[in-house]
Image (tube, coloured by chain):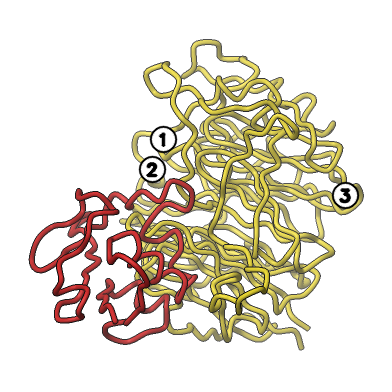
Amino acid sequence: MIRVVLPAHLRTLAKVDGEVQVDVTGPVTTRSVLDALEANYPVLRGTIRDHVTLQRRAFLRYFVCSEDWSLESPDAPLPDAIASGAEPFYVIGAIAGG
Amino acid sequence: MSKMRVLVGTHKGAFILSSDGKRKNWEVSEPLFAGWEIYHMKGSPADPNRIYASQTSGWFGQIIQRSSDGGKTWETPGGEKMPAPGEFPSGASNKFVYDTSEETGKPLTTHQWYDGTQHPWEFKRVWHLEPSLTDPDTVYAGVEDAALFKSTDGAHSWQELAGLRGHGTGPKWSPGAGGMGLHSILLDAKNPQRMYVAISAAGAFRTDDGGKTWKPINRGLKSNYIPNPEAEVGHCVHHIALHQSRPDTVFMQKHWDVMRTDNAGDQWREVSGNLPTDFGFVIDVHAHEPETIYVVPIKSDGHHFPIDGKLHVYRSRTGGNEWEALTKGLPQRDCYVNVLRDAMAVDSLDPCGIYFGTTGGQVYCSSDAGDTWQPIAENLPAVFSVEVQTLP
């Protein structure tokens, strides 16, 4: 079970409180975690990644085990702590815009 | 007695203002979609309980919200749980993908950028939602970068009417200071095949075949801020409006100049007349008097607030040229707000009600066709759009 922490606006949109949990089959990567997240919460499609290119939206970042994972390959294996559920996968909104 | 429902889109959420037909006492809802930009919200003329809203964010992109109970509850069409294995997945209501296929239009991937170079077409947000006059599940979306999309399944899925971008002048379109948005969509109740749209800063366009083919309709416009002031495209049209009894007559608030056409845009003429300034954003038409029109003059493109701190609506009962200032109930000192292009609406009662919202968060209503005004909300976030529904 993968734990995912979403920004407040996306929690509201997905109608969830706190962390969400998703199951990933196969390698645990940024891509597979987000695929599973969007499968469980289709309303989030297009809000984290572009619908077509699947590129991360510019004002969002991914944090994993206190490290910025945003620029890593989406197919890079995530740390064991994420795969085991010991640590959550964070989607963070940039502090921007005043 | 009728009931009124005013749909207000703001910088930080949407609000529904409710009143009876007297239009004196109003209730303001809790914020909907709090924290998000609501560019536009509009009800279906065919079913007033069906309302569409454009919810957008620089962080999270575009969301389309839909209500089927007059705004009490909302859903994101296609955003439900994924279907069971073997079931066909629903669409994604926030998926706006430009059509570049050979079959439906010339592939068109770039437009003119600020520096004159070509720039890729990139979807940013939905500026305006225009529900069909007859079918609650059909709705049009005007988007930035400028294009027109249509949904026939209640906003589950969207298809671009690519003939607009692909008709030939698309590579010459360029963004205005606020972006390159398709902000105005006018449907013709007498002729379902006809539609008008307007784009900043490209101009106005018309289709006579339901959106398959389009042509620019900007003859008569003169914009001194572009290299060729009378160019086929490139005009910064701020808003257009018509009265359904006379759909060949369209009124326009251009960046500068108030204009009208009486032949469906084939030729425009200026009707700014005695306005103190003909810069502005909104324009609308009285519900029962097709020659009575309203604008809110703004000092200039460099100021974006009223002249001398006095908020005036101007009304012409002659279809332009002769204008009168309407001030009773509006602030006449220290007022430096703007009224954005989609932030004026009229109801269908008699006397006709006029509504507009400001960037200062006020929404004003006149229940006597503009003679007197009252604020019906005063401390909202900056107002982007105002629509009104007259309910039985």
What is the chain letter for disc 3? B
Q: Where is residue A18 in the image (x, y as percent from the top left)?
A: 27, 85
Q: Establish whether labels 1 and 3 are both on one chain.
A: yes
Tell me if label 1 and label 2 are in contact, CB under 8 Å. Answer: yes
Q: In which quarter of the image is the N terminus of chain B?
A: bottom right
Amino acid type of the residue tagged 1 in the rendering:
Ser
Q: Who's red, chain-wise?
A: A
Q: In which quarter of the image is the C terminus of chain B?
A: bottom right
Amino acid type of the residue tagged 2 in the rendering:
His
Q: Few, some or many C-alpha atoms within 10 Å of disc 1 (few <14, some 14-19, many ≥20)?
A: some
Spatial separation of the CA atoms under disc 3 and disc 2? 36 Å
Marks 3 and 2, the one that precedes in the sequence:
3
Q: Establish whether labels 3 and 2 are both on one chain.
A: yes
Q: Where is residue B209 in the image (x, y as percent from the top left)?
A: 86, 38
Q: Which mark is residue B300?
A: 1
Spatial separation of the CA atoms under disc 1 and disc 2? 6 Å
Q: Dot 1: what SS?
A: loop
Q: Dot 3: what SS?
A: loop
Residue B325 in view: no
In the displayed structure image, the side of residue A65 where residue B288 appears, left or right: right
Q: Who's yellow, chain-wise?
A: B
Residue at far right of view: B190
Q: Which residue, given by chain and number where applicable, does mark 2 sit on?
A: B304
Q: Dot 2: what SS?
A: loop
Amino acid type of the residue tagged 3 in the rendering:
Pro
Residue B353: image quadrant is bottom right
Q: Which residue, given by chain and number where applicable, does mark 3 sit on?
A: B192
Residue at far front of view: A26
Residue A34: image quadrant is bottom left
What is the chain letter for disc 2? B
